[in-house]
Image: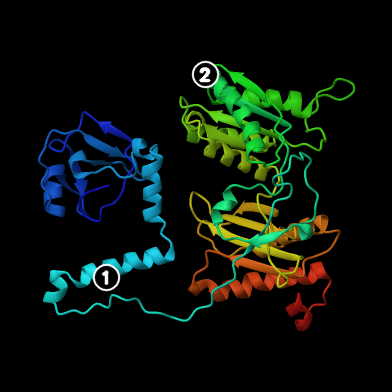
């Protein structure tokens, strides 16, 4: 973070040992005036650079790289030694994520400190230490279902309907990170890793089984295959290993010994766990392998860094275990929404992300009564920065979402649809309502077989 000006934060790409503030000359301003770094900082920010021979930090940016003197920068973030200290991290979290009463006390203390300051008294200002109070409605605590099979040794996946399960108030949200409502068995899976990480893969395999037993998650964890690669392997070697395993074990051969190119039908889903080595840039490895698996070897995948596994932290292993369970389709928890919400309710979320080269539409819609399972879709917008979604795309998304709802609910459609449309400011609100909502009404008319122009039935739908 820069110590001068607006204190912007930067990511340092490298240290340029062959550059220094005295000799670095560059153009600046509209007139492209030539100046060195020492004169620039003195003129622009009133800052004097004391060490004129220090090396420079290189900051890579899209238009051009910039260079900063280390003297005018400071490290931000939490050092690795502090992050590994659980007690210190717990204290930091407690100070950052305060409960409402604690936050009010902190705000009062800050107000009192400002009110008692010399400057405020000299300016004859009066600051009210007590915050204003308003009337508000306090919602009931949501109720969470007691996970099926919790505390039992039954390893069969539960088919007990949630109506027969006990629901209790969600008094402590920490419980959400410790339960598995719908366990999915890990019967067919593989770990891809370098030779040096094989021991960590074996430990992870054993620990998954032990933690499921200890925490009574009721997830049956079979021993996964370990695909070992040479320590010198790169991204292409990982791709080849994934291809080979996918064709040999996930697809297999037919009765005549011919290689199949599509996965064999089985009740158990395959998933791949890739241990990312430190020797390959993890961003590149993740992007390349994730795209490869999603397009050429379509199975569920989970990525974890070698450094993370080597911490031998059960909390990390539990999070990975539960995350894979969720990816396999198992609900981690279910809430009791009460009689006010119909069991045939669809919850829809729509947003447009404008980061990157293209604007991307994100769409998800629930299709089960617990609102835990989603139909999802994503596609690029026609133009960068375009917020309004075209009628053809909306129609395709909602038709597919309604079909997913039918498939899961014996051909029935939702009684209620709640739509959360993110990313729209006040200036575009009317435009979204007039365009997107109008398109949705037409789609609903088609799907529900409503006559066009019947406002009453439209409103009910």
Report whether 104 appears left or right of 37: right
Q: Quadrant of residue 338?
A: bottom right
Q: Name the residue under label 1.
A: 111
- Residue 276 numbered tag: none
Which percent across, then down, holds residue 229? Answer: 58, 19
Residue at disc 1, secondary structure: helix
Question: As rendered, which of 26 and 364 lies closer to the eye?
Answer: 364
Quick one: label 1 or label 2, which is nearer the N terminus? 1
- The image position of residue 459, as x and y in percent, is 73, 79
Q: Residue furthest right?
A: 255
Give the camera-side residue of 324 and 291: 324
412 left or right of 98? right
Q: Residues within 10 Å of mark 2 (few under 14, many from 20)?
A: some
Disc 1 crowd, CA 10 A, few/some/many (<14, 14-19, 20+): some
Q: Would residue 454 be seen by someone viewing this image from the given angle?
A: no
Q: In which quarter of the image is residue 30?
A: bottom left
User: Residue at point 80% right, 27% down?
Assistant: 260
**Residue 36 in the image: above or below residue 5:** above
Residue 428 in view in this figure: yes
Residue 196, label in figure: 2
């Amino acid at each position: 973070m820069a110590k001068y000006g607006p204190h912007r934060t930067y990511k340092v790409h490298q240290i340029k040992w062959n550059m220094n503030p005295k000799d670095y000359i560059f153009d600046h301003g509209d007139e492209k005036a030539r100046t060195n770094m020492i004169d620039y900082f003195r003129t622009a920010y009133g800052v004097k650079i004391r060490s004129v021979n220090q090396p420079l930090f290189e900051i890579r940016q899209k238009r051009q790289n910039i260079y900063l003197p280390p003297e005018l920068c400071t490290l931000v973030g939490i050092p690795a030694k502090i992050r590994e200290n659980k007690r210190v991290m717990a204290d930091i979290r407690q100070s950052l994520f305060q409960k409402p009463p604690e936050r009010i006390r902190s705000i009062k203390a800050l107000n009192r400190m400002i009110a008692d300051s010399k400057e405020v008294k000299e300016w004859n200002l009066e600051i009210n230490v007590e915050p204003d109070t308003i009337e508000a409605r306090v919602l009931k605590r949501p109720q969470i279902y007691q996970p099926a099979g919790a505390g039992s040794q039954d390893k069969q996946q539960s088919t007990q309907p949630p109506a027969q399960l006990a629901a209790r108030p969600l008094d402590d949200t920490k419980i959400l990170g410790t339960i598995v409502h719908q366990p999915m068995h890990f019967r067919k899976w593989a770990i891809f890793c370098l030779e040096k990480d094989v021991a960590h893969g074996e430990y992870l395999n054993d620990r998954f089984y032990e933690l499921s037993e200890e925490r009574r998650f009721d997830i049956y964890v079979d021993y996964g295959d370990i695909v070992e690669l040479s320590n010198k392997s790169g991204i292409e070697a990982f791709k080849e290993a994934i291809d080979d395993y996918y064709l040999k074990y996930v697809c297999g051969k037919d009765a005549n010994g011919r290689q199949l190119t599509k996965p064999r039908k089985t009740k158990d889903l395959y998933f791949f766990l890739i241990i990312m080595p430190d020797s390959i840039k993890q961003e590149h490895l993740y992007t390349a392998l994730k795209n490869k698996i999603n397009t050429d070897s379509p199975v569920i995948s989970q990525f974890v860094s070698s450094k993370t596994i080597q911490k031998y932290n059960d909390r990390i292993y539990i999070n990975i275990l539960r995350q894979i369970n969720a990816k396999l389709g198992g609900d981690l928890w279910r809430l009791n929404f009460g009689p006010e919400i119909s069991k045939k309710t669809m919850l829809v979320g729509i947003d447009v992300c404008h980061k990157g080269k293209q604007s991307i539409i994100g769409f998800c819609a629930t299709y089960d009564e617990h609102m835990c399972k989603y139909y999802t879709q994503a596609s690029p917008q026609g133009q960068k920065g375009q917020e309004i979604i075209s009628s053809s795309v909306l129609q395709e998304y909602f038709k597919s979402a309604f079909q997913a709802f039918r498939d899961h609910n014996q051909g029935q459609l939702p009684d209620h649809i709640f739509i959360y449309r993110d990313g729209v400011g006040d200036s575009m609100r009317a435009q979204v309502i007039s365009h997107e909502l109008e398109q949705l009404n037409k789609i609903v008319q088609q799907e529900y077989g409503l006559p066009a122009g019947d406002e009453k039935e439209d409103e009910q739908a």
